Image (spheres, coloured by chain):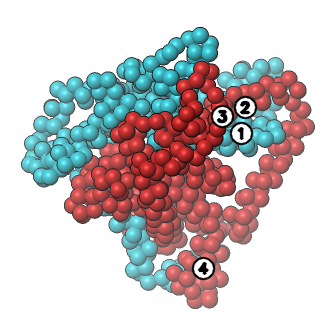
Chain colours: A cyan, B red
Amino acid sequence: MARRPSATRTHAASSPWLFLLPGLVVTAAFSLYPFVSTVWKSFTDARTLSAGTWVGLQNFTDMVHDDQFWTGLRNSLLYVVCVVPFTVMLPLLLAMLVRRYVPGISFFRAAFYTPVVASVVVVGLIWVWMLDDRGLVNGMLHAVGAGPVHFLSNQWLLLFSAMALTVWKGLGYYMIIYLAALANVPNELHEAAQMDGAGAIRRFTTVTVPAIRGTMALVGALSSVAAFKVFSEIYLLAGPSGGPGGEDTSLVMLVQRTGTGLTGRTGYASAISVVIFVITLLLMLLVLRLDRKDKE
Amino acid sequence: MSGTTTTGSATPAGAKQEGSTRRTRRRARRAERIRDAGGQLPTRSLVLRYILLLVVFAICIGPFLWQLSTSLKGTTEDIYTFPPRWFPSHPTLGNYDKVAQIIPVWDYALNSLKVAASNVVTNVIGSSMAGYALARLRFKGRKLAGVAFVMAMLVPLESIMIAQFTTMRELHLNNTLIAVVLPGCIGAMNVLLMRNAFANLPYEIEEAAIIDGANVWQRFLRVALPSVKGTIAVVAIFAFMGAWDDFLWPLIVLSDTSKFTLTVGLNYLNGTFNTNPRVVAAGTIIAVLPLIVMFACLQRFFFRGVGEGAVKG
């Protein structure tokens, strides 16, 4: 440690900033500045082709009276409520299934991760074809004497299909996170519980879950933020206008629709963006808070 | 975060950290395997386990295989049969020709490749430089610089994309591939990943170079960078995958059909023509195949990236 100062002497005072320059410029120009500008524009009536003037809280009061905003908010929140329990539980069960070594297990692990690697557009279009009125899923339903189910023309079935797509695509990702956490659960705990006569389900609830509660909270936080910001899954399954009557529009879809293009209402879209940012932060805090309460 | 102090990890044992973690991991895996083999799994539970694995396999991989099968079915073959037929009766590559006639799919693939390759280069260079400064150099304002990257990571892209769109218009970059690359070209998370990788290197490895009178750039290029190859690979792979798969941002910033990337082009193909599922299937296979091949070859880094990214994210 005593040698440390010599290191500081071997670089010119300016060189650390040269190292940081590209990163800081990009971060400032394309993350921090846009954030400040979004907040600023949310108080103006800016459009794509005009800078706009200060209108105070006008955009936010408009929002309260905008049915599309409430539809978007409802769908995005519903997405969180329906998707997150599955993204917290299913990958955990999957991780427990692939945790133990059996011949070929790394092949299975890789296979389960494949949907993560594929673009959401690719898997979205695959699902559109599978859920077609005469597609694979209806073909299988027909084989057992059910259906056909019109997945892609009913408002709610569309939304639930998109949610299922999100859960399916995230399975492998969260599975890997859980695998790392499960590796840290001491085996002795399981052995002790087994000795006490605890069955598999009992060991799961009394040993595994308490030991990886932190990871479950992390997965909950990550997936609830991701679910709230849903765009592509609904866009691909329901189309750009958000399904029948636009009833499947999510909040991010609304921002994309109102804020882009040559006629974009930049100010109003910025105001919705601010709402998205605030709710995202709240969701993260909420999930992490729940985790802390659990521990007490 | 363990990354802020470097002095704590100055143990010679950590000198070949990257290499030895891999070795210990392999050793641990072997030990696990032996132990599990010792704790004999009864045949019945082994069979049950494989049945479950195969069911999940069908759920995860089935859709891709179905898409592949559809893409290989000729125009004369009925794709709506009950029950579904998994093997094309006369496999053909005709649909791959057809998709290229409807949209310039190979140009789109080239655009995606350009975007992804640039994203890899800028992220690897930019984030390793910034990460090195944050972890290994001492200067006034270092904490503040670190905070800037953490804050940038907390801002969701979806809530600033309208402002980014406006910025690109002001820079007259709208509708160019440069605009697709720019916002993510040095990801804040990659900077933090690299910072942690450099911070975990023992101090000794740079010491000899300092004594030899190497300046900071020589130390960075010849000593520090070669020691964090694994993390660089993770950054590169996720930069490639992120850019290749991205949809929302290119959709917003590209309006001219000749500039589209593959993802936007496929969405366009699906929306405009309402064509033949066989042709759309061929397009999606073109878009997904490169990544699946890459994943098959570099699996280890994909998994490692999830672990490192999730903890920091």
For the residue marked with disc 3, what is the amino acid?
Answer: Ser
Q: Could you say which disc has been placed on residue B53 in the image?
A: 2
Location of residue B169 with respect to B126 vertically, above or below: above
Q: What residue do we see at 43% from left, 50% from top?
A: B101
Mark positioned earlier in the residue sequence (3 or 4)? 3
Location of the N terminus of chain A by quadrant is bottom right
Q: Which residue is mark 3?
A: B89
Location of the C terminus of chain A by quadrant is top right
Q: Could you say which disc has been placed on residue B17 in the image?
A: none
Q: Which residue is mark 4?
A: B222
Q: Give the Cα distance between marks 2 and 3.
A: 29 Å
Q: What residue do we see at 45% from left, 19% from top?
A: A150
Q: Residue furthest top?
A: A145
Mark positioned earlier in the residue sequence (2 or 3)? 2
Same-chain status of marks 2 and 1: no
Q: Which residue is mark 1?
A: A108
For the residue marked with disc 1, what is the amino acid?
Answer: Phe
Which chain does the residue under circle 4 lie in? B
Which chain does the residue under circle 3 lie in? B
> Which sits in the foreground, B64 or A207?
B64
Q: Is residue B251 left or right of residue B61?
A: left
